[in-house]
Image (cartoon, grey):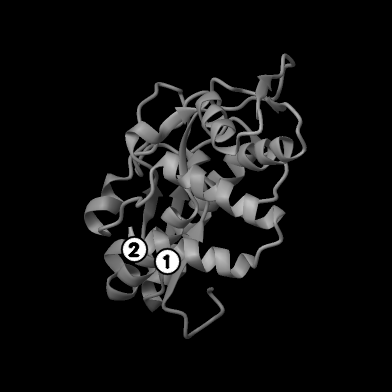
Amino acid sequence: ARGCPTLRTAVIITTDKVYANPETGRPFVENDPLGGADPYSSSKACTEILCAAYRQSYFAARDLRLATARAGNVFGGGDWAAQRLIPDLLAAFAAGQIAELRRPEAVRPWQHVLAPLHGYLLLTEKLWQSQDFARGWNFGPEAEDCQPVAAVATQLAALWGDDARWQALPSDFPHEAGQLRLDASPARTRLAWQPRWSLAQGLAQTVRWQRAWLAGADLAAVCLRQIAEYCDD
């Protein structure tokens, strides 16, 4: 970005896990302390610090407007990443297996991937208009959609049908935060952004996508249809 003289705006995506998390259950606001008790979280917090340093050292003087975006736990069709809740659940359900969960009690801010993507586009437009938007932004769901892993797994199993089930694994695992919530009110008020699908709607759309993939459907058309439905909502 620094080496591209014609660049005007940049949005760097980190994660909702950039915050030092004392697990009080309070939603994080954008000026809360950064940190991380695990390598993933701490590496993303380092990215936030690096972006802030480049913003102050290089970009402000040449009017390159850099913002960072911290999105809640995203899901949606086409996510094949390993060790992620929704892909692991759907793979197990499709195979007729009982899904296994590491931390069913952990609370996360769940949102369909189209919600933060919409937010990133709005943020980029605002950055083009004003340097005032060059900062960190939270993108997260409504409070009622910050739910435990077990609740999400149960909803997804019901949507999938076919006697889909899950069970908790008894083993110990590396540290993960038990509580994580985001305060995205600045994005709602200053960017006029809000999630258009609830957790239940997003999960239903994700199951539809996965069923379409299993049926050999035209997935480009499925994606475009879901984007259109999101925009219409």
Residue drawn at x 52%, y 23% is: 178
Residue at the top extreme of this rendering: 170
User: Residue 58's x, y, as percent?
Assistant: 45, 70
Q: Amino acid at mark 2?
A: Asp
The residue that disc 1 covers is 228
Residue 96 x, y percent position in the rendering: 75, 33
Q: Is residue 47 depicted above or below 61 in this figure?
A: above
Between 213 and 113, the one nearer to me in the picture: 213
User: In the picture shown, does residue 60 fall above or below 158?
Assistant: below
| Mark 2 element type | helix
Residue 80, placed above or below residue 60 = above
Residue 110 shows in the view: yes
Q: Position of residue 50 (x, y in %)?
A: 52, 55
Image mark for residue 186: none
The residue depicted at 73 percent of the width and 43 percent of the height is 82
Q: Where is residue 213, by image quadrant?
A: bottom right
Q: Secondary structure at mark 1?
A: helix
Q: Give the quadrant of residue 104.
A: top right
Confirm or deny contact between disc 2 and disc 1 (CB under 8 A): yes
Label 2, label 1: how far apart the Cα atoms are = 6 Å
Question: Which kind of residue does numbered mark 1 sit on?
Answer: Ala
Give the quadrant of the C terminus. Answer: bottom left
Give the number of the disc on residue 232.
2
Front-most of residues 55 and 39? 39
Q: Quick one: quadrant of the N terminus?
A: bottom right
Residue at image location 66% in from the left, 63% down from the top = 217
Q: Residue furthest bottom?
A: 6
